[in-house]
Image (tube, rainbow, N blue to C red):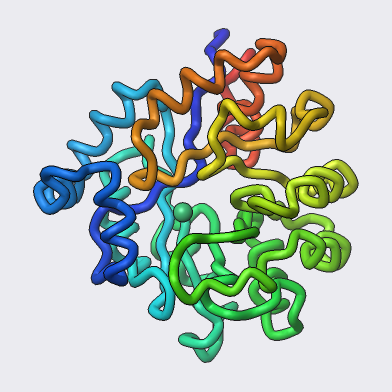
Amino acid sequence: MKMTTPVIDFHIHLAKYTPHRPWVDEFMKNFQPDNYKDFVEEMSDPAVFVKLMKESGVDYGVVLAELSPITTGICNNEDVAAFCRDYDCLIPFGTVNPYLTARPAELVEKLVKEDGFRGLKLYPTYNYFYPNEQMMYPIYAKAEELGIPVMFHTGTSIFRGSRVKYGDPVLFDDVAVDFPNLTIIMVHSGRNFWYESAFALSKLHPNLFMELAGLPPQNLLKYFPNFETNADRILFATDWPGLPSIKGNIEKFRELPISDAVKTKVLGGNAAKILGLDQNINK
Ligand SMILES: [Zn+2]
């Protein structure tokens, strides 16, 4: 049976945090100026969000937990698990803040084996650790053993308290070398001043991917002039609800002067392989 490649948004947050830091709510209000509170309540119902996602042309969404009390706020693993529970199209990614957990590798094992998480998102610039610190290595060893991908915030953030020195893509050179079977995803692709090194490193290491959340699609060829040469290592993502429209982002991406084959890979083909959703594609 031949099935079309899905469209996958690799970076979605819950609208409701418990709580957001005030400056995060202020930022989100840019996109929902009149009825932000109602919007947050409405979108806390996964059925409502899934409808929006499908209407936007997205088949699967990766939903991210976050424990970043200093910079952005709290979105517990439990809340993400509950949000995704009844929907195969919502793929839960858990998180571990290394300063809030005594035995992070044990927590990762529980998140995956008992709670159904399919990957991890870690926040170096918000939690203040270098991705190549030895403190983090038990987490990576466990993720590699379990066969789950690990994504990391890289580059700048407008949120107060974020420290960009922890988000340099070059730090993943160590991780990629030391964990050759771990799938590593650089969220935001080194945003602002590290696009070139994120691109070069992901071409260098077969296990190191770039992710496009928060990057205006119309600027991608400016940031990455050789975009098409790295077609197997780039993942589409939006950072919803922090953008005007998922659908608009997909439309702008589809308008880029690159081949349809590359667009298909980036919009979902690569992500489907990482997430194990590719079993039925093109067979
Ligand atoms: Zn995000």
Across and down, in percent, residue 276 comes to 59, 38
Q: Nearer the viewer, residue 109 or 73?
A: 73
Any part of residue 185 in sight: no
Q: Is residue 198 found left or right of 39 in the rendered image?
A: right
Q: Is residue 99 left or right of residue 55?
A: right
- Residue 118 visible within the image: yes
**Image quarter for residue 167?**
bottom right
- Residue 16: x and y in percent read 23, 58
Q: Is residue 123 above or below residue 80?
A: below
Quadrant position of the C terminus in the picture = top right
Please say if 281 is above or below 99: above
- Seen at 63% across and 61% down, the residue is 146
> Considering the image in quadrants, where does the N terminus appear?
top right
User: Where is residue 27 shown, x and y percent of the image?
Assistant: 33, 55
Q: Position of residue 178 (x, y in %)?
A: 85, 67
The residue under the point 58% across, 71% down is: 125
Q: Residue at x 57, y 8 (%)?
A: 2
Give the total number of marks visible in the rendering: 0
Question: Picture quarter containing residue 230?
Answer: top right
Q: Quadrant of residue 60?
A: top left
Q: Which residue occupies the foreground of this view, 250 or 134? A: 250
Residue at 58% x, 33% y: name it. Answer: 272
